[in-house]
Image: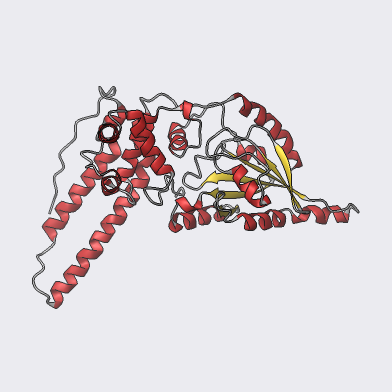
Amino acid sequence: MLLTTRRLPATPSHPAVHPHISLAPPSLRLRRQHGRATMASATSTTPPVLGETLLGLYEKERLGLSRYADEESNEDMFWETLDADLQYWTRGLRPVQWYPGHIAKTEKELKGQLKLMDVVIEVRDARIPLATTHPKMDLWLGNRRRIIVMNREDMVSAEDRNAWATYFSSQGIKVVYSNGQLGMGTMKLGRMAKSAASTVNTRRREKGLLPRPVRAGIVGYPNVGKSSLVNRLLKRRMCPAAPRPGVTRELKWVRFGKDLELLDSPGILPMRISDQTAALKLAICDDIGERSYDFADVAAILVQILLRHPDVGSEAFRKRYKIDVDSDCGKMFVTKLSVHLFNGDTTQAAFRILSDFRKGRFGWVALERPPT
């Protein structure tokens, strides 16, 4: 049976409304068309299931498999269109930029210290591994051995962890999952760092030199958990750490036993973040300074992401805040929540939504998947 599709009017080049208020970005319209086509097809081709005959049971099983396939298709479409949605929603917002003075000094000093490192431990946020790597990191490291630490492993699912481990393994990069707050993964990281640089002392012995501790530098974006990881490795508080960007402001070498020296460094960011979808993810996950973004804008876009996210949806918002989700417009929900809980203060409502996400109140929610 042929299905006719009504042509949608062209999107104006200069929309009259705020971008993230729009209820139908291009990818969402595609999803709606896809959903209507699927429903129409299922309605027109599926015969009624009568009784519990063998044929009826077979049809029930087939319909169940069809619904499962549709769910998988919807999940795939979410990940395929997420960045396109974010680009559409952010194009009218103030750019997210944050480059405090100490970062420029750190970057210059870190480049000099890299020459002394046997292995580099790059810490990333497990929810956004691609957004939390410096675009020049590969250039700085060259052929130097690297271990990627995916911190905050408790905030993503086992499926996401396995997917990223497979992705980095295919590139020959070792990955350790950790929870810097609880110390999970730290001992494995210590062993892996020593193993990765074991050839250093082998070459020294061949030259008649005495062995020395392996030097490992810990680098990464602000607030991804570098200092907490060092403190857990050392089992004492040697480096200042707090759940906000910009606490560590100078490089510091510390000794871990007799065989390993660690360099804790402040978070480093590009002077200008050209990829604003990545910048938005940094703001959502609290990996960039709060002065760089507007709480209400970022929270509104987070709501729109989570409403479409295959592991969250509108029911999570109803359970969490005891109010209905009237539309898929994030700004409308932030406003409604502000009236419900904060006497119309949208900043407080936005901060509550962001805090709930950052504390895992919506469950295991990753905002990135490995490239295909």
Residue located 10% across and 64% down the image: 47
Q: Is residue 108 left or right of residue 335?
A: right
Q: Is residue 245 left or right of residue 319?
A: right
- Of residues 251 and 67, the one nearer the viewer is 251
- Of residues 86 and 248, the one nearer the viewer is 248
Q: Quadrant of residue 31?
A: top left
**Residue 360 place in picture, x, y as percent:** 41, 48
**Residue 334 place in picture, x, y as percent:** 30, 34
Q: Is residue 107 left or right of residue 153?
A: right
Residue located 61% across and 29% down the image: 103
Q: Quadrant of residue 305?
A: top left
- Of residues 288 and 337, the one nearer the viewer is 337
Q: How many marks?
A: 0
- Residue that sits furthest to the bottom in the current view: 54
Residue located 69% across and 45% down the image: 144
**Residue 1 place in picture, x, y as percent:** 12, 54
Q: Is residue 84 visible from the viewing direction of this image?
A: no
Q: Is residue 349 left or right of residue 208?
A: left
How is the rendered protein coloured?
A: secondary structure
Q: Is residue 223 visible from the viewing direction of this image?
A: yes
**Residue 131 place in picture, x, y as percent:** 49, 39
